Structure formats: C-alpha cells, structure tokens
Amino acid sequence: MKGNSRVTAHLQRLIKTLLGVVDITLLHARIYEDRGLAKLSEHADGTLQAARDGLNRLLRRVLFLGTTPDISQRHSFSTASNVPDMLRKELDAQYRLNEQLRTAIACCHEENDYQTGALLGTILAEVEEKHIYWYEQQLGLLEATGIERYIAAQC
C-alpha cells in the first residue's frame, strides 16, 4: 500500500527519536545496574523493551506503507552521570517523543490515515500513562525525600 508522504515523514522522525530513546535508556539502565540500583535498572529495562516494541510497530507500518525505513539516523539525547539528571534526561526524551506523536497523529487525521493514527495513539497512551507519569513521580519523590533516601530505596 502506498502511504502518504507527510505521514511517512512523521513516522521516520518518530523512528529517529525512538532509536535515540533506546540508546539513552540502554546506557542509563547499565549505569543503574553498575551502581547497584536494581529498581531503576529494572524499570529502565522495561522502558527499553517498550521503546523497542514501539519501534518495531513503526518499522512494520512504514514498510506496509511502501517505504523503506531509515534506521541510520537517530536523535542524539544528552546523557548524565548522576541519578537526578539521568531521570530528567530520560523524561526529556519521553516529552520529545510525546510531542512528536501528537504532531504525527494530527497529520494522520488531516491525511485520513486513521489506521496509522490509531497505532500512534496506542504508543502515545503508553508514553503518557506509563513513562512520563513514572518519571515525573520519581523526580517528585526524589525532591520530597532527598537524594540519599531516594537512592537507598532504589537498591
């Protein structure tokens, strides 16, 4: 099936962003693990799997729409070395993904591509309800309890 070029361009931007999300999440998961922060490491591994699943769905959709996905480019998110900044960087990546998903969904509706819009809506719900919410919670807990208590609770 031949897809709309505006829609496939949005999907390609999302693929680029998700590849960057995979990169930063994988790196942070291994840093958490190396520092003995098992709970943060486990959560990052779950987020990593969700990002890979979303990426897989987008790749399949782009192929279905008759375009070859470009996986040679990725958004480069900056990383951090301390836990609060790492959580903020991961949240920033989720915010970027959220914004791009919303823009892409609007384009899908303008172009009458409701199947792609529905797919993106599913991914958006997961980003908002699971990932953004969790990172905002963690940063709130960190602020309320202090870095030492927060870190101790993550072991």
Image (cartoon, rainbow, N blue to C red):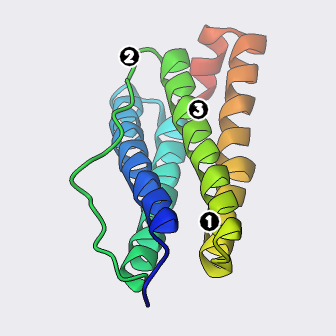
In the picture shown, does residue 4 fall above or below 99? below
Residue 77 picture location, percent across and down? 39, 30
* Residue 5 lies in quadrant: bottom left
Q: Which residue is mark 3?
A: 91
Q: Amino acid at mark 3?
A: Leu
In the picture, measured across the screen, residue 78 lies left or right of residue 44, that is left
Which numbered disc covers residue 81? Answer: 2
User: Where's residue 126, x and y in %?
Assistant: 67, 58
Is disc 1 surrounded by few (<14), some (14 to 19) or many (20+) residues within 10 Å? Answer: many
**Precedes in sequence: disc 2 or disc 1:** 2
* Frontmost residue, 95 versus 79: 95
Q: In front: mark 3 or mark 1?
A: 1
Residue at 26 percent of width and 48 percent of height: 73
In this view, 65 is above or below 79: below
Q: Using the image as rendered, state which of residue 143 and residue 1 is in the foreground.
A: 1
Q: Residues within 10 Å of mark 2 (few under 14, many from 20)?
A: few
What residue would you read off at disc 1? 120
- In this picture, residue 69 sits left or right of residue 11: left
Q: Position of residue 78 (x, y in %)?
A: 38, 24
In the rendered image, the quadrant that contains the N terminus is bottom left
How far apart, in angstroms, are the residues tagged by discs 2 and 1?
32 Å
Q: Residue at x 74, y 31 (%)?
A: 137
N-terminal-most mark, 2 or 3? 2
| Residue type, mark 2 in image | Ser
The residues bearing labels 3 and 1 have C-alpha atoms spaced at a distance of: 19 Å
Asked where in the image residue 12 lies, by quadrant, the reply is bottom left
Q: Earlier in the sequence, mark 3 or mark 1?
A: 3
